[in-house]
Image: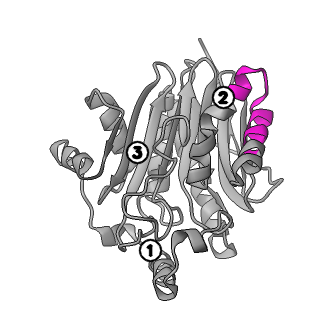
Amino acid sequence: MNMKPVIVVHGGAWAIPDDLADSSKLGVKNAATFAFSILANGGSSLEAVEAAVRILEDNMAFDAGHGAVLNADGDVELDAIIMDGKNLAVGAVSCIKNIANPVMFARTIMEQTPHIMLTGSGANKFAEKMKIKKVPTEELVTENAVKEWEKYQKYKQSVTSLFNTEKMHDTVGAVAIDSKGNISGATSTGGITNKMVGRVGDSPIIGSGAYADNFIGAVSTTGHGESIMKVTLARQVLFNMEKGETPQSAAEHALEYMKNKVHGRGGLIVVSKSGEWAAKFTTKRMAWASVENNILTYGLNPGDNFQEKLDL
């Protein structure tokens, strides 16, 4: 099989403020461009989505890895998932600490253990065994994340009373199809500010934060985790595609279903087995970018569809 490679990435669906708009757009453009170069040189979709998400985890503009937000105790707990559509292999981590690139650790779990997900202290012990580099918490936290957390502490309000799916940082992800027709997806997050210690959102949950199947496509989601889990948003998109819907229609209907059913907002990226893709969201903004045929397409606001020719 000789397919046209495609990569799509997102940097989270929320009310991205103007002071983060340019860095968010640049971040997703850089991640998509680098990941596409892997695909263009014959690399696998799994390598591409891991690389894209790793780049976003290293970028302080996003809530994943570096740039993660703080939980109720002022600590950082990270979640991630990666899935190979060729054989439905999955690796995931939840509530891990001091790991700069959770998506890389998730792939290690997929390839080096018989399990799908490791969590908390057990996951961190395995990371030490696998010699995955630890970083101090301070390295992962931005000044803005600290200010957000201090605001919650000052007003003694819970995440429930202050939470707004329009205003919270949230999640990064990538989906891709390679020249052999293999499809993969990955998602990573630092969660939501002031979340309860031990809270796990949708990102590392198979079928919610991500899903990939060569026979259908791949999806990575972003938004209100509890809402996404209730409707298994990633799999919902693929169910719609199995019924014959295009990626665009499938994404729109799944997001509309979540909004109507549980009043949740969010966004997602999807690529089909034929290389069709979509980036849709119901929040004010979502940073996203895709590359196919050496054309970089990206956006931030509803209706955006900017394009640049890449010289690869």
297 shown above or below 87: below
Residue 241 placement: quadrant = top right
Residue 151 seen anywhere in this rendered image of the structure: yes
Measure how far apart labels 2 and 3 are at the Cα level. 22 Å
> Which range is magenta?
238-255
Image location (x, y in percent) of residue 168: 59, 66
What main secondary structure does the magenta stretch of the protein show? helix
Q: Nearer the viewer, residue 228 or 217?
A: 228
Residue 185 colored in magenta in the image:
no
Residue with the mark numbered 1: 142
Left or right, 206 with reference to 253: left
Q: Is residue 294 visible?
A: no
Which residue bears the numbered disc 2? 238
Foreground residue among 89 and 182: 89
Q: Position of residue 112 (x, y in %)?
A: 26, 30
Q: Secondary structure at mark 1?
A: loop
Q: Are marks 1 and 3 in contact (CB under 8 Å)?
A: no
